[in-house]
Image (cartoon, helix red, strand yellow):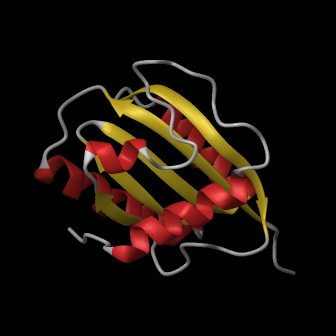
Amino acid sequence: MTLPLHHLVYQSVATTFLGEPELEQILTHSRAWNSAHGLTGVLLFSTGDIMQVLEGTREEVEYIFDRISRDARHANVLKLADGPIARRQFEQWSMGFKAVRPEDYAQLQGYVDPARALPPATAGTDSSLREVLAAFVSADLARL
């Protein structure tokens, strides 16, 4: 029996500078962990702002999000979407990655400017948020 799929989209702000070597290390570790635990997703990074989509079983998604939420490298962790999904949007990536310009990042549906600390997007945008992110990432995925 296949377990139902779940997804979670969050954004946060890096508490320390993340240059190319630091991002490579995070991606290498995340890809290994995600592959071993059946997780897929994508990480968007823009001058310290992070947005990530996690997909997998509810148990695995909630476990890794709890670890991320307690990780000292993140601040202002804000859940943008969380719930069951019919299919994976990022099944081809254990952890896709794209560095984006701040102006592109700020235009993503569901994005909340951490400096303004607004409440998250209204309910009902979960699937459209994933679709926007998938289209955004698919257009030009950067690989480290």
Q: Is residue 134 left or right of residue 56?
A: left
Q: How many marks?
A: 0
Query: In which quadrant of the rendered view does residue 100 lie?
Result: bottom left
Q: At which x and y percent is residue 75? A: 41, 24
Q: Nearer the viewer, residue 128 or 63?
A: 128
Q: Nearer the viewer, residue 90 or 24?
A: 90
Q: At which x and y percent is residue 80? A: 62, 40
Give above or below for 76 relative to 127.
above
Q: At which x and y percent is residue 108? A: 48, 49
Identify the residue at image location x=51%, y=61%: 133
Q: Nearer the viewer, residue 117 or 86?
A: 117
Give above or below for 38 relative to 58.
below
Q: Is residue 92 left or right of residue 55?
A: left
Identify the residue at image location x=32%, y=72%: 141
Identify the residue at image location x=63%, y=31%: 120
Q: Can you say which quadrant of the picture contains the N terminus?
A: bottom right
Q: Nearer the viewer, residue 29 or 7?
A: 7
Q: At which x and y percent is residue 19? A: 13, 45
Q: Can you say which quadrant of the picture contains the C terminus?
A: bottom left
Give above or below for 108 relative to 121.
below
